[in-house]
Image (cartoon, coloured by chain):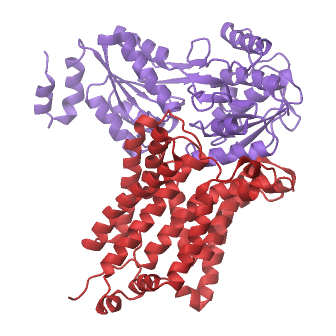
Chain colours: A red, B purple
Amino acid sequence: MEMLIPIIVTLVGAATPILIAALGELVAEKSGVLNLGVEGMMLVGAIAGFVAQFYTGNPYLALLCGAFAGAAVSLIFAFLTLSLSANQTATGLALTIFGTGLSALAGAPYSAKPIALMAPLFPDMLARDPFWRVLFGYSFPVYFSFFMVAAIWWFLKRTRTGLILRAVGENDHSAHSIGYSVVGVRYAAVVFGGAMAGIAGACFPLLLTPQWAESMTAGRGWIAVALVVFASWRPLRLLAGAYLFGLVMTMELYAKAGGGVLAIIPSELWAALPYLATIAVLVLISLRRDASTNAPACLGKPFMPAN
Amino acid sequence: MTLSRRDILKIGGAAAALPLLGGTAFAQEKLKVGFIYVGTINDNGYNYGHNQGRIFLQDALGDAVETTYVENVPEGPDCERVLRELAQQGNKLIFATSFGFGDAVIKVAAEFPDVKFEHATGYMKADNVGLYNARFYEGRAVCGTIAGHLSKTGKAAYIGSFPIPEVVMGINALALSGRRINPAFTVKPVYISTWNDPAKEGDAARALIDQGVDIIAQHTDGPAALQVAQERGIVGGFGQGADMSAFAPEAQLTAIIDHWGPHYVNSAKAVIAGTWTAGDTWEGLKEEVVQMGAYNKKIPADVVADAEKIRTGQIDGSFKIFTGPIKDNTGAERVAAGVAMTDAELLSMDWYVEGVGQPV
């Protein structure tokens, strides 16, 4: 049992970047845009955040720089797919390759340089307490991710702007015919997704491992993309999904490190669990009619109004 | 007959004849040496080490050599293309620095019989393909001595990428030397199935430290685990491939540093003198291909002295870590008392010594 709190603390660290990136992707997909460039945008955010932290030592500024960098590269994607109606799948993949290369190029001079980790948000008395650190021991992005789950849920469900965004994603021609700017809304959603991916990327050097390494997000952007489907485009399920993935990723390592009860389930099984869980959830979704139709109807389709 | 590079470009269409012409053209000129790396020279570890070796060679022989490198070369057909290009550009000595380049090297070497190839950590030789490797485990034996003395819990961990002999050897050397000092010393191997995922390396270190490990050795290419050791304030860990003290000034007890430079100099000199033959070298502390970083100043003097004894013992040949009696982790005796394991046995090691937990 004494292992429980350390496991939760590690799990929160593993889940947070995935959750933040997936929330951004969820908003973009709700507007009808499938952006497969999350991994690339995260890497660009990671190097931008690293460089800002390296020179200023201000982690909030670093997160902001990560957000700006992620948003900036997402604009390239938005321009190609929304203004020029390029294929979203191909452009998204290209964005990932571009982001990986760009971040490696920009990061080349910083490979042997450490930075400081972002300090916990709460005072040491709470953050270092052996028990209360499970609630108060984290730095800002963790609380930000929870706040954004609620904020995005509220925005999509309860606000007029959120309704317009969903309308654009469900039926772009109808939204267009009653006077909403489909392309404008989608630009905003894609840029928001890019900023969130950038913040998620910046979490890697700021929260997890205070250094720059090429491709340091190691495929977690793809997990974020998959999670959005896994969660059938619902923010609260996304929260549950991110923590489920975080749990199995963490448990694999704790099981390998070998502590008593943890070793009962072999680590290979822990390693396979995310994929088993994905299959199980996809089966459940396809069994339930209402959930399977939850995908935005215009997802991935370019908008070409007939004037 | 001399050809300028421009002339060669002009007759570029006759690509098949090119290596032949290049051979006569550059014989009197400086030796061109090519390197291919599987990763980036900025990885601060393995590939960085090889590139430092290239720079060492260039500095040591100056005008006599001209070195070029290609980084991020994928293992597979693309590697053949890069090797062929280097050979066609007139490189007479080519170092392929990753295990997975082996097949491509053998194939391309057959097409360019006048070009010498050397393949690091490989096992396939040919008339113009030599092999070279480093005895990293000798460094692990020095690390294990320090770990055996300093660990309070007697529990060390070893974060590895894949269970290949190279990594198994390192785990066993750490455990054997640690148990010479503290018979209760154990090593827990954890394989994370990747050479480069810093966040996973960090989380593995967290999981291990949470379960009472106070020494962390790693065999992945980055300093992520050391940084966690520093953050958590455990006894420490060891740099791998390069000095990583910048990332973990308190936690890095010492480092195993790859120093390929002297080997590259010897090979280049042999090619220039015309005495190069396809060799099979496996050098270590003695030849300074493996070096130890500075000892952390928090290590007590008597521990440093003991570590130095192991280091110098391996240099003068009086100490060999893989000398019997060695039991495996099921208790069966694998090496009889007084018998030293052969290189071939080491290179195919697939069992763990006593005190190493079976990876799950």
Q: Residue at x 23, y 25 (%)?
A: B20
Residue B193 in view, yes or no: no
| Front residue of B149 and B15 | B149
Residue B224 horizontal side relative to residue A216, left or right: right
| Front residue of A282 and A141 | A141
| Count of picture labels | 0
**Vertical placement of B174 versus A39: above or below?**
above
**Vertical placement of B165 versus A187: above or below?**
above
| Front residue of B155 and A3 | A3
Residue B247 at what x, y percent from top left? 58, 32
Q: Quadrant of residue B246?
A: top right
Q: Residue at x 39, y 45 (%)?
A: B77
Residue B104 at what x, y percent from top left? 42, 38
Residue A265 horizontal side relative to residue A213, left or right: right
Q: Quadrant of residue B41?
A: top left
Residue B353 in view, yes or no: yes
**Vertical placement of B329 versus B94: above or below?**
below
